[in-house]
Amino acid sequence: MTSTITETKTAVRRAAHVALTAATALLLAAAAPAVAGPSAGDHLYLMVTTGDGRSSDTRGTLLLCDPPQGHSRAAEACAQLDSVGGDIDALPTADVYCPMLYAPVTVQARGQWNGRPVEYRQTFSNDCVMGARTGAVFALDG
């Protein structure tokens, strides 16, 4: 009985993840015409997934940078991205001490910066490490 409940929960989580991924694709498709063109500005669709493959929680938002909007630290995220030309890998690592706990966080960014496509995906050992490496960009909770 417990095995069936666990299998059902896993199936529901996977279905929700697939639905969220499909919704993300639709959001990107719908948002693209609204921000396309020479004066469209920089934009990234950001996703943060906490947990592993067995159990996870995914949040996402569209970060627009002209004017900054999308999450509570949008202005800071846009400024940080602007300083590195939209290259998330080039963001400077913050000088912080993070606990050595394994609580995986996977981040994804897809969009456009300075007219160039951006695709980024990385898994960090925990949210402190993620924050140290990506600054305000994936700080969706404020």
Image (spheres, rainbow, N blue to C red):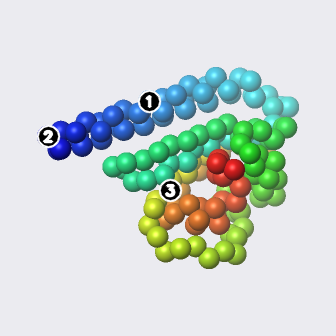
Residue 54 appears left or right of 130: left
| Residue 34 left/right relative to 120 | right
CA–CA distance in space, label 1 to label 2: 27 Å
For the residue pair 32 and 13, the one nearer the viewer reads as 13
Question: Mark 3 or mark 1: which comes first in sequence?
Answer: 1
On the picture, is 10 further left or further right than 101? Answer: left
Residue 90 on image: x %, y %: 70, 63
Q: For the residue carrying disc 1, how many other residues have a C-alpha within 10 Å: few (<14), some (14-19), or many (20+)?
A: few
107 vs 60: above or below: below
Residue linked to disc 3:
105
Pointer 2 with pointer 3, Cβ within 8 A: no
Query: Residue 105 in the image: x percent, y percent?
Result: 50, 56
Q: Circle 2 — which element?
A: loop
**Which residue carries the number 2 mark?**
1
Q: Residue at x 65, y 47 (%)?
A: 140
Residue that badge 1 annotates = 19
- The amino acid pointed to by label 2 is Met
Q: Is residue 118 above or below residue 95?
A: above
